[in-house]
Image (cartoon, helix red, strand yellow):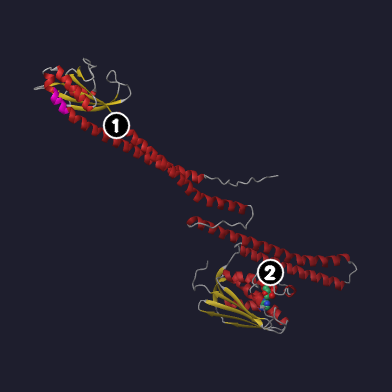
């Protein structure tokens, strides 16, 4: 046994679309934050750094001027005193280096005699600059806590005629870095909050989109399994609503198509079964009564022949109808004389009228040319006139007229026959519909004639209408567009 595994998609809270939307949201937000973060911290760092340099350089350059004479005249005590007190005021460490880069004075009194090869110092000693600032990771000067950061400011000490050395100021920048880290931490917090909000929004919006899509997909799946009565829920606005509405419209059409097809098949089967049943009874009679009188046998056989004609009619009508349905019918469009066509068709039916002493009158305007399928319009005239003859008493009168008005032709078939009751008029163009089944059957009708007529008329862009009074007679009127004069045959 073959099992068809249902591919029903499980309703997930977070579908594919939801995931994609959230991912895109997050990516965009992260990217913009990353860029802002880098730019902002750079900006803050630069700002704090510049501020610090401005502060330090002012006091440092002033101090260098004070220190120069003391250093030149080797007043060690006063120099020491000045440096220590200034260092205390500035909150850092002050050193004086000679032109070799050796420490001569240190407010911490630790590094005397040591040569410091800091880039700031070197740049002054080589004469390329008179002041230099930089921030370093500690470790350059022995005894510093390795790892923490420090700012160096170096200015030239100038004596009366030549440079005497370098005034070096070292101070921790941990405060500054801490405020920078605070800014970064705040940014991270904002990022987390915004990302969380964005994620929630993504979930919300994607649900808004995916839920109706999932619902519709489930509905389609159910329909695919054969339940044509299911409909999608129409809600919301915009595209999703239009989608559901269009889908429902399609489902409606499919369902009604399915219903009418079933109806048609069941009617057609019934229509075929009746003559078959009759024929079987007739056949069995002949078969099981070998000593049946010859006249009776002939009557049975003639009845069977009649039933075969009926069957042939039904099958023929069914074939034309299904061909029209599937649009596979071949049409031979051409200009032809409609007046002649109507007259010739009436000619075919005249013997039938004569047999029942019916008058078949024709009022045909000659020379009406039409662009269409001649054989199919012949059938229209034939079916309508045949009906008029069939549903009119012996000795009745049938008038077929044809006129043209502007670019249209009007064909009318009028009889003074039995007429059609009001409640049936709306249905006579339906397939297999007959007002009086027994009567139609007797006359070999299939109940398909008028529905074929209507399809053929519609196919030519025309219209058919009927007026009828029971007991008085009926008039069928067909309006047909003649087609453009000189219009090219298809
Ligand atoms: N001219 C008419 N007068 C009265 N009844 C008519 C006329 N034409 C059609 N009808 C009714 O409409 C029904 C449908 O017509 P039709 O489709 O041609 O089927 P059929 O002729 O095979 O019965 C007929 O059975 C008949 O009851
Ligand atoms: Mg008929």
Cα separation, mark 1 vs mark 2, equals 97 Å
- The segment highlighted magenta reads 61-67
Mark 1 touching mark 2, by CB under 8 A? no
Q: Main secondary structure of the magenta part?
A: helix
Question: Position of 27 compared to 116: left or right?
Answer: right
The image quadrant that residue 306 belongs to is bottom right
| Nearer to us in this view, 434 or 224 | 224
Mark 1 vs mark 2: which is more N-terminal? 1
Ligand 1 image-quadrant field: bottom right
Q: Which residue is mark 1?
A: 176
Check if residue 63 falls in the magenta segment. Answer: yes
Circle 2: element type? loop
Measuring from the top left, give residue 119's x and y in whole percent: 23, 23
Q: Which residue is mark 2?
A: 432
Q: Is residue 387 visible?
A: no
The residue located at (29%, 20%) in the rendering is 144
- Residue reaching furthest left? 160
- Residue 73 shows up from this direction: yes
């Amino acid at each position: 046994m073959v099992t068809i595994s249902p591919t029903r998609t499980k309703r997930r809270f977070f579908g594919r679309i939801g995931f994609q939307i959230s991912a895109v949201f997050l990516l965009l937000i992260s990217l913009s934050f990353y860029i802002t973060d880098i730019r902002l911290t750079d900006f803050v760092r630069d700002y704090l750094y510049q501020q610090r340099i401005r502060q330090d350089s002012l006091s440092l350059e002033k101090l260098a001027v004070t220190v120069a004479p003391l250093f030149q005249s080797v007043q060690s005590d006063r120099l020491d005193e000045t440096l220590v007190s200034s260092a205390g005021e500035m909150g850092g460490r002050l050193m004086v280096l000679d032109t070799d880069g050796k420490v001569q004075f240190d407010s911490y009194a630790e590094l005397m005699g040591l040569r410091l090869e800091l880039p700031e110092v070197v740049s002054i000693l080589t004469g390329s600059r008179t002041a230099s600032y930089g921030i370093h990771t500690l470790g350059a000067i022995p005894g510093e806590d390795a790892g923490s950061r420090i700012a160096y400011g170096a200015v030239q000490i100038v004596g009366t005629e030549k440079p005497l050395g370098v005034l070096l100021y070292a101070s921790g920048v941990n405060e500054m870095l801490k405020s920078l880290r605070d800014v970064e931490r705040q940014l991270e917090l904002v990022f987390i909050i915004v990302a969380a909000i964005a994620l929630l929004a993504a979930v919300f919006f994607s649900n808004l989109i995916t839920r109706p899509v999932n619902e519709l997909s489930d509905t389609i799946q159910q329909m695919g399994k054969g339940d044509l009565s299911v409909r999608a829920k129409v809600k919301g606005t915009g595209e999703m609503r239009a989608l559901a509405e269009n889908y429902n419209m399609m489902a409606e059409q499919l369902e009604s198509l399915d219903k009418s097809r079933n109806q048609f098949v069941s009617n057609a089967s019934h229509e075929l079964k009746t003559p078959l049943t009759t024929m079987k009874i007739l056949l069995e009679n002949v078969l099981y009564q070998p000593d049946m009188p010859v006249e009776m046998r002939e009557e049975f056989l003639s009845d069977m022949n009649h039933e075969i004609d009926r069957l042939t009619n039904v099958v023929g009508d069914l074939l034309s109808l299904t061909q029209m349905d599937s649009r596979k019918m071949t049409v031979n469009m051409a200009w032809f004389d409609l007046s002649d066509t109507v007259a010739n068709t009436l000619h075919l039916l005249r013997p039938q009228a004569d047999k029942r002493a019916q008058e078949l009158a024709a009022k045909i305007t000659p020379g009406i040319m039409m662009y269409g399928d001649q054989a199919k319009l012949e059938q229209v005239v034939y079916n309508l006139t045949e009906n008029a003859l069939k549903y009119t008493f012996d000795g009745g009168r049938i008038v077929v007229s044809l006129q043209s008005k502007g670019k249209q032709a009007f064909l009318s078939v009028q009889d003074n026959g039995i007429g059609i009751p009001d409640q049936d008029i709306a249905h006579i163009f339906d397939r297999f519909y007959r007002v009086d089944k027994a009567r139609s059957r007797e006359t070999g009708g299939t109940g398909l004639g008028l529905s074929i007529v209507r399809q053929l008329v519609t196919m030519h862009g025309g219209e058919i209408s009927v007026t009828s009074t029971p007991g008085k007679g009926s008039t069928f009127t067909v309006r047909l567009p003649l087609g453009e004069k000189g219009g090219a045959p298809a």
